[in-house]
Every structure is written in C-alpha cells, then in structure tokens.
Amino acid sequence: MHHLTETTKQTFLQLLDDEITVKDFEQWVYQYSVNLEKELQADLHHDLISFNYNQKDSFTRLKDKIFSLVDNEEFNIWRTKKLLVDIIENKIDLVLATRKLRKLYFDTGENFIPITLGIGYESLLDDVPIPSEYKQWNSEGLKEKLKKVAWHRGDIINDAKTFLETLIRNEHNWA
C-alpha cells in the first residue's frame, strides 16, 4: 500500500467493503483534501477531487481507482477481521454473517478462511431467512427456522474467535 495514513487507508477499505456510501466518501474527500494531496500522487488526488460522484456507475469507477492503492491481501484480512468481530460482538445477524463469510471464502481463493466458517455454516443455515425476509414467514415457521441458528450460534462464535486470534497472531508475519 502507498504511504497512506491510517485514516485514509480505513476510509478506502470502508468504501471497498460497502461500509460507507459514495456520498459519504465524496464528503470525506473534500474535507480531507489537504491531507490527501500530501498522501496521493497528484493525478490521483486530482481524480478524486474532480470525480463525478453523481454518475450512474460512480461506485464501480471509484472502486477501480482505489483498488489499485490497496493491497488485496490486506483488504481481505481487514474485512475478514471486521466480519469476525461483528459476529463475536453480535452486531450482525448470524445467517447474514454466514452468507458474507461464504462470499469472502470464495473472494479469498478458498484457502484463507477455514472451510467450516467459509461454507460449512452457510450450508447448514441456507434455508433460514435473514431479517429482511422475516415478514415473508409466519411466526411459527420463522421460530422453527431460527431455532437452527440458536443451535449453531455457540459453534459459529467460537470458530470466529479462534480464526480471529489466528489472524491477529499472524499479523506481524504479513507486515
């Protein structure tokens, strides 16, 4: 990664991981412009300042620009750790989390995330709805499905903790 400050790096990673909107990113670019000018090559800084944030495919175009500045492995480690922490701290619906883990598992080449976390739990819970789908279910049916999540919750959280500890332990080896 270029010589980016932690703030810039975090903001870039958040944009790439859909954590912040293009609008929020645009606001940040303007507010942080003076610092970005020191961190980025002149042409890239100019690109971000003059970028048309309202165009239809602005997110894709922006991602392409920023992805070249971010180390792919570092990005994958960052978003995996973030998801694991969200699971452990119960900040994300577990079924949704298993779907995100599955996507990450394939995005990272199928050998980074342990297979149980990567696809095992997702396949066990693939018939359980995520919160946005609850309204399509009657309460009895939903209650039955959610029992399955409760049944696996402890294992998923323990596996998430174990893998997070491994990532943190190995961090200095990658730096």
Image (cartoon, helix red, strand yellow):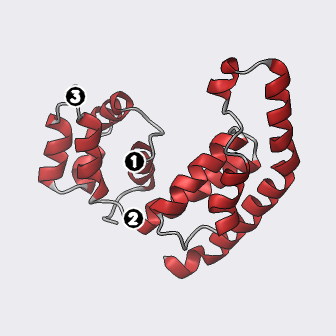
Q: With 71 as the anchor, is 110 left or right in this view?
A: right
Q: Residue 168 sits in which quadrant?
A: bottom right
Q: Residue 116 sits in which quadrant?
A: bottom right
Residue type marked 1: Leu
Q: Position of residue 17 (x, y in %)?
A: 45, 46
Q: Categorize mark 2 by other alpha carbons within 10 Å: few (<14), some (14-19), many (20+).
A: few
- Judge by depth and name the residue closer to the eye, 167 or 27: 167
Tell me the residue at 29%/38% (across/down): 59
Tell me the residue at 27%/33% (across/down): 30
Select label 2 or label 3 by which is in front: 3
Q: With 21 as the anchor, is 45 left or right in this view?
A: left
**Vertical placement of residue 85 versus 68, above or below:** above
The residue where tag 1 is placed is: 16
Residue type marked 2: Asn
The residue where tag 2 is placed is: 72
**Mark 2 vs 3, N-terminal side:** 3
- Judge by depth and name the residue closer to the eye, 20 or 116: 116
In the picture, the quarter occupied by the N terminus is bottom left
**Which type of secondary structure does the marked residue at label 3 adopt?**
loop
CA separation in Å, label 1 and label 2: 11 Å
Q: Categorize mark 3 by other alpha carbons within 10 Å: few (<14), some (14-19), many (20+).
A: few
Q: With 100 as the anchor, is 27 left or right in this view?
A: left
Q: Mark 3–mark 1 contact, CB under 8 Å?
A: no
CA separation in Å, label 2 and label 3: 25 Å
Tell me the residue at 65%/69% (across/down): 114
**Vertical placement of residue 33 versus 9, above or below:** above
**Mark 1 vs 2, N-terminal side:** 1
- Judge by depth and name the residue closer to the eye, 47 or 121: 121
Q: Position of residue 48 (x, y in %)?
A: 21, 41
CA separation in Å, label 3 and label 1: 17 Å
The residue where tag 3 is placed is: 56
Q: Which mark, by number, is residue 125?
A: none
